[in-house]
Structure formats: structure tokens, C-alpha cells
Image: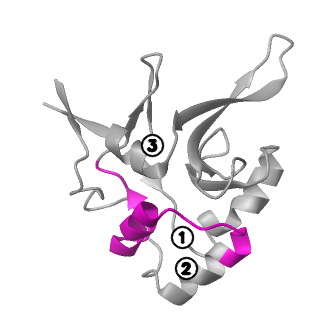
């Protein structure tokens, strides 16, 4: 088995089990950015304009220590669903503010991290148990920018 890195085409898996949202319009994009008080990365916007969420063809992300995580889908970019609920989900999970949650399941999240300013880093959050048995979040920085994340994404091929 070998791996194939994302090179700008075939990002979305077709057919997709994760139902995409409505087609992303410039008005909806402005409304979402205003609600989240961020400017989303242009590469992310471009992908979401192709298909507003769904399963990824290139869903594996390598960590610096050699571990790999699988991100099966990106959530839809809508005001009242998916990414638009980032503030609510982050608060409910006890994550820091200024996170735009682009994929996750309440035990793990892939997020655009705006704590450092206008250009977000990409972080992966994983819920684990501490030695005392308490649930805690571990944070892993997977890329300094969204465009750097895209260059790291890969899929397994036979």
C-alpha cells in the first residue's frame, strides 16, 4: 500500500455519505464570517464553493511525531448548521474561543485557530482521560496555515 498526497484536484469523495450543505453564495459566506468574526482562508472557501461539505478523498493528516489522524469529512459552511455552530460547540466542549470547527464529532475536532491573529493555524483537538480519570482536551498543531494543511493531506492507495 502507498500514499497519494493531495495536489489540487479530487478533494471531495463522490459519492459522499456526509450530505453537503446548500451551494455557498457570497452573501452566505459574508454572513458566516460576520457571525464567527473571522476571515476564512481563501483555499478553504474555494473548496467549500466546489462542494459545501462532505466526505474527503484525502482525509489523512500526518503529525510531526509520525502519528496519523483521519478526517472523514468537512462540515457544511452554513450559518445555522455545521461550521456556523462553531462558537456553540466550542463552548459546549470547553474549547478555547476563536476556533472555527471544520470537522469533528465532540471527541475530536479539526479547527481553524484564530487565537494568533487573522491567518489561522490548523489544530486538531482530541478528548482523552487524564491520570485522575478526568476528561481533558489535547491540542495538536497540524499546520501553520490552511494551505499548508492541504499540502499534508493524503489518501492510501492499493
Mark 1 lies on a secondary structure that is loop
Please state the extent of the stretch shown in magenta in the rendering: 34-57
* Residues packed near mark 1 inside 10 Å, few (<14), some (14 to 19) or many (20 plus): many
Is 5 covered by the magenta stretch? Answer: no
Circle 1 residue: 77
Spot the residue most to the top. Answer: 131
Circle 2 residue: 29
Asked if marks 2 and 1 touch (Cβ < 8 Å), the reply is yes
Mark 2 lies on a secondary structure that is helix
Sequence order check, earlier mark of 3 and 2: 2
* Residues packed near mark 2 inside 10 Å, few (<14), some (14 to 19) or many (20 plus): some
Asked if marks 3 and 2 touch (Cβ < 8 Å), the reply is no
The CA distance from mark 3 to mark 2 is: 23 Å
Picture coordinates of residue 87, whole percent (x, y)? 76, 60
Is 40 covered by the magenta stretch? Answer: yes
Query: Closer to the camera, 116 or 14?
Result: 116
Q: Nearer the viewer, mark 3 or mark 2?
A: 2
Q: Nearer the viewer, mark 2 or mark 1?
A: 2
Report whether 85 appears left or right of 123. right
The CA distance from mark 3 to mark 1 is: 16 Å
Point 65% across, 69% down: residue: 84
Q: Looking at the picture, does residue 141 appear above or below residue 106? A: above
Q: Answer yes or no: is residue 122 visible.
A: yes
Report whether 152 appears left or right of 41. left
* Residues packed near mark 3 inside 10 Å, few (<14), some (14 to 19) or many (20 plus): many
Circle 3 residue: 71
Report whether 87 appears left or right of 18. right
Point 26% across, 62% down: residue: 15
Amino acid at each position: 500500500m502507498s500514499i497519494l498526497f493531495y495536489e489540487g484536484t479530487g478533494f471531495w469523495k463522490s459519492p459522499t455519505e456526509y450530505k453537503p450543505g446548500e451551494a455557498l453564495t457570497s452573501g452566505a459566506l459574508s454572513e458566516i464570517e460576520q457571525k464567527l468574526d473571522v476571515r476564512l482562508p481563501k483555499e478553504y472557501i474555494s473548496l467549500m464553493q466546489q462542494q459545501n461539505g462532505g466526505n474527503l478523498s484525502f482525509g489523512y493528516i500526518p503529525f510531526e511525531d509520525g502519528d496519523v489522524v483521519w478526517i472523514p469529512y468537512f462540515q457544511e459552511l452554513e450559518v445555522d448548521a455545521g461550521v456556523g455552530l462553531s462558537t456553540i460547540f466550542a463552548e459546549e466542549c470547553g474549547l478555547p474561543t476563536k476556533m472555527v470547527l471544520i470537522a469533528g464529532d465532540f471527541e475530536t475536532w479539526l479547527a481553524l485557530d484564530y487565537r494568533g491573529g487573522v491567518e489561522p493555524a490548523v489544530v486538531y483537538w482530541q478528548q482523552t482521560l487524564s491520570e485522575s480519570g478526568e476528561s481533558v482536551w489535547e491540542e495538536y498543531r497540524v499546520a501553520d496555515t490552511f494551505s499548508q494543511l492541504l499540502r499534508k493531506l493524503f489518501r492510501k492507495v492499493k
